[in-house]
Image: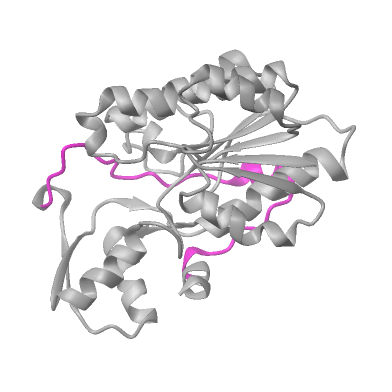
Amino acid sequence: MVVLVTGASGQLGQSLQHIAPDYSDCEFVFASSQDLDITNQERVNSFFKSNKIDFCINAAAYTAVDKAETEFEKAEAINVLGSKNLAVACKNNSVKLIHISTDFVFDGTSNKPYLETDITNPLGIYGQTKLDGEKAISENLKEHFIIRTSWVYSQFANNFMKTMLRLASERDSLSIVSDQIGSPTNAVDLANAIMQIILKSKIENPKSQIEYGIYNFSNEGTASWFDFAQEIFRVNNVTIDLKPIPTEAFPTPAKRPKYSVLNKSKIKTAFGIEIKDWKESLLQTL
């Protein structure tokens, strides 16, 4: 079974490369943006025709939340057009698509974990383009899994965890937002969850009825960004003056959802996926 991974140089792409040896039944094709420009329809079509592919994991995305406010066309090209191009190519070549989306499709006004069926209302360009990408996929391809996730970090690429450790080596004190609540997600855990979906839908139950559509995945438990930073420093025995601040004290070009915890009941029931608590996963990563 051949699995194509787009966005191979990003956090999730590198995490999938990290765990690939554990899935010997799969042959992986890792493609960075240099190898496969998903915004170019002709190149996407040619790539799919030239390679026998069973599953495509779309880990390619424009994720610069604040820059997206002024780089709308670039965000739209990657998150919307790129997603559509992959969906069309998957349909034409009988490939199943696993696409990664975000908690930013919600506005954060809920007081309970978001279900896949809850009303979406993005606060900014990034969230809107990710939502439009979801729609482009669902309109062009039945055989798809869209996985919404949140607060992704890992030992790879740039992320909050690595930024905190870098800043702690440069400063004596830090002020971190404490009134945005979500669930940190280890990209390696997300990568393993994706592979479990592939194996259960292709190998273990080849004739079973697969429920395509949207699924939520993040690590268990909730935290504020302040809580997340505090745990990173505790595990690393870093002594630093850490101050909690409200969102209003740290204005950004793009608004963030105040609450973006995701309900994972659907993915756990459908695929038997066991999810680690975010603190346990962070400890293993560090």
Residue 93 relative to residue 125: left or right: right
Q: Is residue 120 visible?
A: no
Nearer to us in this view, 185 or 78: 78
Nearer to us in this view, 114 or 60: 60
Residue found 37% across the figure and 36% down from its top: 62
Quarter-of-image position of residue 73: top left
Nearer to us in this view, 244 or 132: 132
Residue found 73% across the figure and 21% down from its top: 93
What x and y, as percent, mark residue 81?
Answer: 45, 20
Q: Is residue 144 visible?
A: yes
What x and y, as percent, mark residue 43?
Answer: 55, 23
Residue 63 relative to residue 276: left or right: left
Q: Is residue 266 magenta?
A: yes
Dividing the image into 4 quarters, which one contains the C terminus? bottom left
What x and y, as percent, mark residue 16?
Answer: 60, 53
Nearer to us in this view, 4 or 133: 4
What x and y, as percent, mark residue 244?
Answer: 18, 64
Residue found 52% across the figure and 50% down from its top: 12
Q: Is residue 275 magenta?
A: yes
Q: Is residue 42 above or below residue 36?
A: above
Residues rendered magenta in the picture:
250-279
Quarter-of-image position of residue 239: bottom left
Residue 76 relative to residue 134: left or right: left
Q: Main secondary structure of the magenta part?
A: loop
Q: Is residue 261 above or below residue 221?
A: above
Dividing the image into 4 quarters, which one contains the N terminus? top right
Q: Is residue 60 above or below residue 91?
A: below
